[in-house]
Amino acid sequence: MSLHVIASNDTLLATLRRSLQQNALPVASAVLRTPGSHLLASLQCLNDAPPGSIVLLDSPVNLGSTANDDLVVLDDWLRHRPQLNVLLLSEDNSKALLTRAMRAGVREVLPLPPDPTELAQTLRRWSERAAAQALMSKATGATGTTSGTPSGATSGPATNPTAGPTSPTEATPSTAPNSPTRPGRLVAFMGCKGGNGTSFVAANMAHIMASEFDKKCAFIDLDLQCGDASFYLGSGANKHSLSDLTRQIDRLDEQLLASCLHPVTPRLNLLAAPHSLENAMAIHPQDIEKVLTLARNLHEHVVVDLPRNLNALTLKVLDMADVVYIVMQSQTPDVRDAQRLVNTLRALGLSDTKLRLLVNRCKPRGWVSLTELEKAVGLKVQHSIPSGPEWVDESLHTGQPLTEVNNHNAVVDALREATGALLETAPRKNRHWMQRWIGQNA
């Protein structure tokens, strides 16, 4: 572990060094920040710090706008060094500071003055993450990569002799042809409560968008710890995941992205969540920003499945998103959690024009009516998906999109209506089975 300390006064610097030494935490460097100086001047010596390094610094709140200026500097500095772990010491424990700090890429905000025991535990936790990240980097180097392409993946149209044969019928991700001339639309799905079907709704709307509305779409699973959205789009058959990209983030390009995308249909590509928690822990918000920016350049729409907890990663996606679907059920616990989530998102600066309320598993005689729900949450319900376990269960158990296993039911119709509204296009009307049979045999 490489630990670096930046303090704004001699007393704090001495206190931190003494505390770290008592807990057997070696300090690689300790810098005293000159009063009134720009934070960037103190960060210059860390420009070449190895990945996983921990930077512990304080931001005084008694110097006017210094704290805000520091976060602006950190935001810009960390964009080019996403593999560093910055921990901020501050007397300000307000929600506003925590939000700005997470958006700037700060890993954790600690109280000032620090509690020695808590500080030691925090640094050990981050050092363990840094060690795990270093092991993964070595493992990646051991398996080998070619031109920024994950081992075993093809690299463009040319044949790669080390990648193994490719089946003539195997689909390949569609990215380069017909790339949109302007960034694609970023649509995020976030559940107000676990288990309300957010991933299922997001995955199936992305599939309908590509297969029935002919939109070039990427579906990205950013529920890094519990991500299972890929199972809804092909039984989790993807070979690569998001972590294969972020481990080589400095070499990210269209070719590397294409090698990690799993082609679900000719116009729908899937980027799965990491297969292990260790890989997920090494992904940083700045990495996600680069991946999403490139994906938007290559697709008309990028659909993102987010976890329900707010952190630096989800805040980054919410800031970038054009539309944010808040998925809930018409149950009392969901209403309470949705109300809290909407208020928090508004406090973070997200406008109501970006937020769309979607009620899943909606029942005509639910515990909470849609009118009562809208009044409590403070948002109008844009879409409601009816409850239909008899139709949905087969899709869930087989790992196939709902339209592939049961194309004519109320759930699919509601998902089509919601997708059409998102695209501002009316869904195509499906012909009756007899009309389709006559047409095929005419």
Image (cartoon, rainbow, N blue to C red):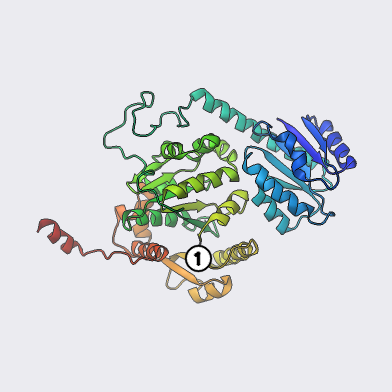
Residue 366 image position (x, y, % from top left): 47, 71
Quadrant of the drawing holding the C terminus: bottom left
Quadrant of the drawing holding the N terminus: top right
- Tell me: residue 35, above or below residue 349: above
Outermost left residue: 442
Which residue is more in the foreground, 395 or 109?
Answer: 109
Residue at the disc numbered 1: 356
Q: Amino acid at mark 1?
A: Arg
Which residue is more in the foreground, 107 or 267?
Answer: 267
Which residue is more in the foreground, 246 or 183?
Answer: 183
Residue 37 image position (x, y, % from top left): 81, 45
| Left or right of residue 148, residue 211 in this image | left
The residue that appears at 65% across and 64% down in the rendered structure is 347
Query: SS for tag 1?
Result: strand
| Left or right of residue 17, residue 78 in this image | left
The residue that appears at 66% across and 31% down in the rendered structure is 50
Residue 329 image position (x, y, % from top left): 49, 64
Q: Is residue 223 visible?
A: yes
| Left or right of residue 87, residue 331 in this image | left
